[in-house]
């Protein structure tokens, strides 16, 4: 997963990442193309979503990326995160929100209260138009529609959302969220697409055809492997490559494949796993490459290599060669001395970050 919303990734750099993925047989690029901090592709009828100075991919760019990836056996799965993580869109079209705005596109990390207003017909039409656009640009049988970190406070005081809730006979906003997610997934299904959602709110009321992507290890186990739904694994403390090497050391990423393979043996609903690069703070190519490499290669190798054949020592030996192939600028790749920090540093980093993830979950109204 590459987040090009928080920091825009120029086309040439993106193609280089696809080349590196192909080298290590990573076969899906989950392309996170919108978020609070940026909207990166054009949608007919909503011209203000994108602008030259903020950076975006034209239809031609997207077609080129999809075919470049396809030639390398990589499927591109686009993600538009909804109904939360929408400030960039709301700043251009405040009428799609509960309050009417105005909104300013934020920078940095955060969970924001303003989300799509699902009580308004215009907003539902917008969400459908976004799905139409994704379906027309991306041949992949999957689309990712986000669904993580959604504070429901605005809906609780919005007359339109409350009206919709009563009309549908729901007693709380969480049920309204389930309705919206099921509606939009059904719309995508009519167009031949399977919907992927982050697992935050997914439960038995969500259509069983929805695939859940599990990222938050602090969620209860029933949430992590909800029996009705297929699962993509992307554990925060193993596969978030934007985190420091203290939090996610190289050897830890390498080990992750083992647990994914074990899960796949025990649970046929596990489709596979992902490595993720969020970019709230990774705003230069140098920073992105120093976080991606060599950890992307460690994850890829351990996902694909038979358990009995995994050898971290061998992997590290071949890295000295392979790293030259994935980055044109070796200054962008961290030195081996930082790949596996001291255990004490790792423990401290994990403890601090767990506090942060817990606080974020509370803010988004997710019970852990
Ligand atoms: C996520 O990290 N909120 C998917
Ligand atoms: Zn509303």
Image: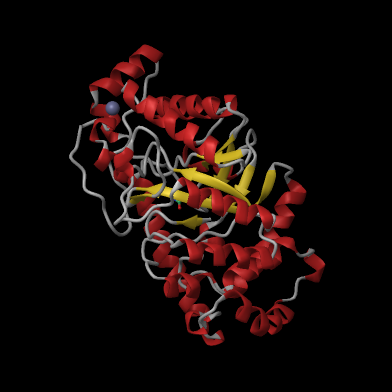
Residue 39 image position (x, y, % from top left): 37, 47
Q: Position of residue 127 (x, y in %)?
A: 41, 31
Which residue does the image show at 21% across and 48% down from the upper left? 104
The residue that appears at 21% across and 43% down in the rendered structure is: 103
* Outermost left residue: 102
Looking at this view, is 65 or 115 the one in front? 65
Q: Is residue 52 left or right of residue 367?
A: left
At 20% from the left and 32% from the top, the residue drawn is 100
Can I make out residue 128 in this image? yes
Q: Position of residue 135 (x, y in %)?
A: 54, 35
How many labels were placed on the picture? 0
Could you tell me residue 88's position as x and y percent?
A: 30, 46
- In the picture provided, is 79 more to the left or to the right than 233? left
Q: 253 above or below 183?
A: below
Quarter of the image where one finds residue 175: top left
4 horizontally vs 105: left or right: right
Q: Is residue 28 at least partly visible in the picture?
A: no
- Taking depth in this image into account, of 85 and 328 the one nearest to the observer is 328
294 sits left or right of 262 in the view = left
């Amino acid at each position: 997963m590459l987040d090009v919303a928080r920091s825009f990734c120029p086309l040439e750099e993106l193609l280089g990442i696809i080349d590196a993925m192909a080298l290590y047989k990573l076969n899906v690029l989950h392309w996170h193309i919108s978020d609070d901090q940026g909207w990166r592709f054009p949608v007919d009828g909503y011209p203000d979503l994108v602008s030259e100075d903020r950076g975006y991919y034209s239809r031609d760019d997207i077609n080129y990326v999809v075919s470049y990836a396809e030639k390398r056996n990589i499927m591109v799965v686009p993600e538009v995160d909804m109904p939360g993580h929408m400030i960039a869109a709301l700043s251009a079209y405040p009428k799609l929100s509960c309050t009417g705005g105005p909104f300013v596109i934020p920078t940095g990390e955060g969970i924001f209260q303003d989300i799509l207003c699902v009580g308004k017909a215009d907003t539902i039409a917008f969400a459908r138009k976004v799905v139409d656009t994704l379906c027309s640009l991306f041949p992949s049988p999957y689309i990712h529609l986000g669904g993580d970190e959604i504070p429901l406070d605005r809906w609780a005081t919005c007359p339109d959302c409350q009206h919709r809730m009563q009309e549908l006979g729901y007693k709380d906003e969480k049920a309204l969220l389930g309705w919206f997610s099921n509606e939009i997934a059904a719309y995508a299904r009519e167009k031949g697409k399977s919907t992927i959602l982050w697992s935050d709110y997914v439960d038995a009321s969500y259509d069983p055809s929805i695939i859940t992507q599990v990222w938050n290890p602090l969620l209860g186990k029933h949430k992590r492997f909800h029996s009705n739904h297929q699962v993509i694994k992307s554990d925060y403390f193993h596969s978030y490559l934007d985190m420091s090497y203290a939090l996610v050391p190289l050897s830890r990423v390498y080990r992750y494949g083992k647990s994914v393979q074990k899960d796949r043996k025990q649970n046929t609903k596990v489709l596979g796993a992902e490595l993720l690069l969020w970019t709230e703070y990774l705003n230069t190519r140098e920073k992105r490459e120093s976080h991606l490499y060599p950890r992307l290669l460690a994850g890829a190798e351990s996902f694909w290599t038979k358990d009995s054949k995994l050898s971290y020592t061998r992997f590290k030996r071949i890295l000295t060669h392979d790293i030259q192939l994935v980055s044109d600028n070796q200054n962008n790749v961290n030195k081996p001395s930082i790949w596996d920090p001291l255990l004490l540093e790792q423990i401290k980093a994990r403890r601090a970050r767990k506090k942060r993830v817990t606080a974020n979950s509370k803010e988004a109204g997710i019970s852990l």
